[in-house]
Amino acid sequence: MKSEIKLTILKLLKFIIVLMIIDFGLGFIAKEVFFSQKTGKFHRTTYAIKKSKDDILIFGSSHAHRHYVPEVVERQLSLSCYNAGAEGQQLLFHRALQKMIFKRITPKIIILNIDENFLFKSDIAFERLSDLHPYYSDYKSELHPILRLNSSMIDFKMLFKSYQTNSTLVHVIKYYLKPQQDYKGYRPLFDETTANKIESLEKREPLKEYEEVIDDIFVNTLVDFIEEAQAKKIKVVFVTSPNLILRDITKNESLLKIKEIAKSKEVIFIDFLNSPNYLNKYNLFHDASHLNDKGAKLFTSSVSKIIKSSI
Amino acid sequence: MLFNSIDFIFFLPIVFFLYWSLVKKLKFQNLLLLISSYVFYGWWDYRFLALILTSTLVDYCVGIQLNRSSNKAIKKKWLLLSVIFNIGVLGFFKYYNFFIETFTSLILSLGFSIHSSWTLNIILPVGISFYTFQTLSYTIDIYNEKIKPTKNFIGFAAFVSFFPQLVAGPIERASNLLPQILNSRKYTYQNLSNGIKLTIFGFFLKLVIADRAAIYVNAVYNNIENHDGLSFLVATLFFSFQIYGDFAGYSLIAIGVAKMFGIDLMTNFNRPYFAASIGEFWQRWHISLSTWFRDYVYIPLGGNRTKKWRWLFNLFITFLISGLWHGANWTFVIWGALNGIYLIIEALFKKRNKRGLLSIFVTFILINFAWIFFRADNIDNAFKIITKIFTKPGNLYIGSGDDITASLYTVLAISILLIIEVKKEFFNGLFSISNNRIEFVRLIGYSCLIFIILYLGVFGESQFIYFQF
């Protein structure tokens, strides 16, 4: 028995050492490969965190990413701008991104494109936080409180270097083989939608990514987003993107709460949700909720003018 | 408690250390096994521990009574008590609402009006299908005088609730597991090493294959109206790997963990998708359940030593019940029936079991077709899916937001699995990493497998599919 225990300890030690070396070595390579990306969503996030020195930063989901043309903002406001919008991401991600960026720079203005359902309970908002894992070792204090919300095992998982770049390999290969061009974070959509396309899409059951109950975690995150920026004397602007089809959002509790928070924190709130300039203008939209390049330029110009007049 | 949870990461080493420190006192070792198994189970819902304990008590007593009496009629009564109790408990918790709803629908379809409020809000106790079958096999085997009952209650209770296989099998036979629990175990490094290896591969199957494939499968199967035939074809193909990764993964972890405690559980999966016939598939898939049904349903019905029509009927009935065992839904019944029909056709027309790539492929396709019923939420949806596959191929859904990357991970993960399994199935004599004579090669091999799990795995702490059965 004693000799078996001795043998076990010896063999386990060997295994742990080899495992650590493999994890460190391959994990290091995986991380280098990850940060060597020249285009794609991870490249844009990395750029925003580690390189951008712009005066204006835009945060938000695909609506931010596809609707704000930095070139237009720069021309109208004479300030440099970067679009840090991330497709499919929600408040927790934007807050994490903001914290990491603030560690290095203090922009003059930050624009948060508001999705009206931002404050509703959503599991996906937590699940998609895994996109932040590669940055964990460099921004532990910023990311830990947010990533902990998604997994109680986060400390344990992050012990492994290879886990930090989990599920990034295919992205790297994809963008290496087919680079994804962007214009300071903005990626235009060029197609125009039609009434027929919208009608056929409406027949399909919508995918619901949230439950219509206000989540306090998101409320606090939004408040933190504002307060940290304001503490650094950064102007915070909330903007809602336009809809193609008129929607009744008067009873949307999430949006009402966001407006209430914005008011109490004296945040500029620019509301384009049911703007008549965009309603039923199929030539400005790529699909029911995303503007095409033409629409994005018009929208960015309108937002910039309002910001210019209010600062 | 889930194997892929933080709780288990702490639970396992603590129990392991305590267990082997009690090596000289078998009684205490078994008591520890029992307590830790109850903690493992109670972590999910402690209220249902009473159910396991009752089941254990009933079958323990029935076992002793069966041995005491030499009167066949009395023995039969005791066995009947065990069967009625176990099937009754299983029937109530798992099938009560199903039968009530079916009955109500039947009455309504016949034109009668019925205002039923008979359905109950019943929670299905995790693993009930597994441990009731395990204890049933104990009393049946005693009745058939294949084994002797034990008077050691702690040992018997540990056999019923042995935590590695309590909630999703393998469904152990008393003749295999009970003697191992009742006799002293010796700690060996080899057991620990083999246990860790199996556990690592189990996690690979669960986290890299099953949970990865589940992303696409759920996106398609949970939104039937939004997807076309081509997407269902791919989703069904992915599901076949999801369910294999999930269940074979769980089984391997269970076998691996049990091995760490010096206990050998039976093999539950043997690369089933390389089966060249449906019959062979069922010798390779969920072996512990297939053999259970063979020994306790098929053979008692007469097996194949009877008239041909009766033999085919026995086959069909066995698979029908097996389908129902999987879940209280007509989809499972049809899935079981379909497998039964496959086997009948095979029995009628197949002359020889010729192993070839074509027969492997055909078997795989047939099994995949049956999985549609297994995965669909209801029969209507299953038929909608089949109709779409055959009549409306349409567009292929590639991933959320038209992002193909998530789907490519699934393809990558399945490719890795296929490389490993093809090598094991067809080229086993060639270079081996897991059994390499050079220790360094083995260490690097398993470290790389852990790297793949960490680099490509999905870490959502999701439940194993078979927990619901």
Image (cartoon, grey):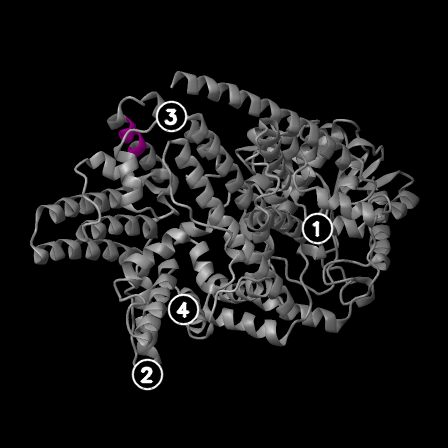
Q: Which dot marks residue A131?
A: none
> Considering depth in this image, is B71 or A200 the residue closer to the camera?
B71
Q: How many marks?
A: 4
Do callouts 3 and 1 point to residues on the same chain? Answer: yes
Highlighted magenta segment, given as a residue range? B29-34
Q: Earlier in the sequence, mark 4 or mark 2?
A: 2
Q: Which dot marks residue B187?
A: 3
3D distance between C-alphas at marks 3 and 1: 46 Å
3D distance between C-alphas at marks 3 and 4: 44 Å
Q: Quadrant of the C terminus of chain A?
A: top right
> Considering depth in this image, is A310 or B399 the residue closer to the camera?
B399
Instruction: Decide: is B192 above or below A205.
Output: above
**Residue B326: x %, y % from top left:** 39, 58
**Residue A282: x %, y % from top left:** 79, 67
Residue type beneath disc 3: Tyr
Callout 2 crowding tier (Cα within 10 Å): few <14, some 14–19, many ≥20: few
Residue type beneath disc 1: Thr
3D distance between C-alphas at marks 1 and 4: 39 Å
Do callouts 4 and 2 point to residues on the same chain? Answer: yes
Residue at image point 38% right, 25% down:
B187
**Residue under circle 4?**
B340
Chain ID, mark 1: B
Callout 1 crowding tier (Cα within 10 Å): few <14, some 14–19, many ≥20: many
